[in-house]
Image (tube, rainbow, N blue to C red):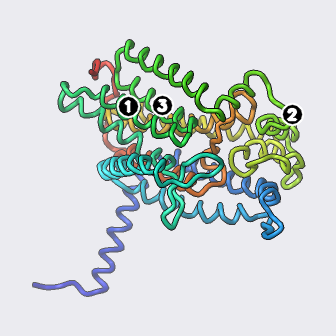
Amino acid sequence: MATLAPNQNAQRYNRNRRSQIAIWWQEIDRSTLVLVLILMAIGAVAVAAGSPASAKRLSTSVEKLRSLHFFYLHMRWQIVGLIAMFWASSLTKESARRFGILLGGAMLFALVLVPIVGSEVNGAKRWLRFGISLQPSEFLKCGWPILLAWIVSWRARDPQIPVVGICFAIMGVLGALLMLQPDFGSTMLFSGAFLVMILLSGIDVKRIGMFGAAGVVGLVVMYFTYDNGRNRIDNFLFGGSAFDQVDLAQRTLLNGGWTGLGFWMGTRKMALPEAHTDYIFSVIGEEFGLLACMVIVVLYLAILTRVILRLVDEEDLFTVLAASGFAAQFGGQAFINILVNLQLFPSKGMTLPLISYGGSSTVAMCLSMGLLLAVTRRNPFIQREKFSLRAIGDIS
């Protein structure tokens, strides 16, 4: 049998690789990809603006951090995040589903370990340290929508499977594990994504009421058992001191007016805690102005709108649910952070997606967006029938 010369094998490999890249470029949602990259570029500039404030605040007599300390670290994490995003977006829908299910299951198991062997920081156990620091709740965001969408899609194969009961049980376990850390912000975020996906699956209205009642009961229990959460809610409802984080964030945000004071010209940011993470939106407002903040809000809305438009003519239930779950998590986290900076929501310790500095959060968010691009991949030359919730019917 004749064999190919080494140079012919190399040429064939290069042709196949170029063909795979061409197919990937045709099938992914390029508009969403571009919007994500724009937000990441804005994030690099924003972290550079907020880094001096955090570096000064965290410097000690033993170690003095450079002004751009967090910017340099952020750029490294962004590179890792970009690699993760492009790799995930190159997966087929089936491969993305398998990966998401495995990742979601692994992170749920990791959350079980957190109260036992987790590392405590600022009174909360949210990290596992095995040579590297891992926050399971952040990477669960990459698998949670896919895991739930996969379970709900069982209904298409066997109408007798109680998928709603299974989903509620998993959500209850997840909420309990998160509140053991405690992490009320993530509990709210996962619950919100869960509610959106369950609503889209065609659940009966009575079950929605049961979920709402359970949420109210959980909120009341949290208020009387979680001191930090109760203090944040009290400060939001009844007002706190002039030196509360949320009040400082709002005054920093408004200090720049419409056009901002200019890059590295902000002054109030120097007194702002977590200027490079939770309150980076306020730093952007002070140095680049409220107009820049408006542009960021429009970019987030554009991504959510683009995902919705992508799903309008989608006929696959799993794709609709998984993509909607990713969009709900992404949009929910973004707008909770923005509302906190505007003093319109209690402080939750939640980063601004794709913009705030972060290790686990940056990589996990990029991976989530990559999986979103993967599950929404489609052949542009295939005509599709419009997706209809009426075709699903009620699920048990």
* Tag 1 near tag 3, CB within 8 Å: no
Residue type beneath disc 1: Asp
Which of the marked residues, 1 or 3, is nearer the chain's N terminus?
3
Tell me what residue is drawn at x 28 percent, y 82 percent. 8
Q: Nearer the viewer, mark 1 or mark 3?
A: 3
Disc 2 to disc 1, C-alpha distance: 50 Å
Q: Badge 1 local density, few (<14 within 10 Å), some, or many (20+)? A: some
Where is 110 relative to 335, above or below? below
Disc 1 to disc 3, C-alpha distance: 27 Å
Label 3: which residue?
Answer: 191
Q: Which structural element holds mark 2? A: loop
Nearest the eye: 347 or 336: 347
Residue type beneath disc 3: Ser
Query: Residue 291, located in which quarter of the rendered image?
Result: top right
Q: In screen coordinates, is 197 left or right of 331?
A: left
Q: Nearer the viewer, mark 2 or mark 1?
A: 2
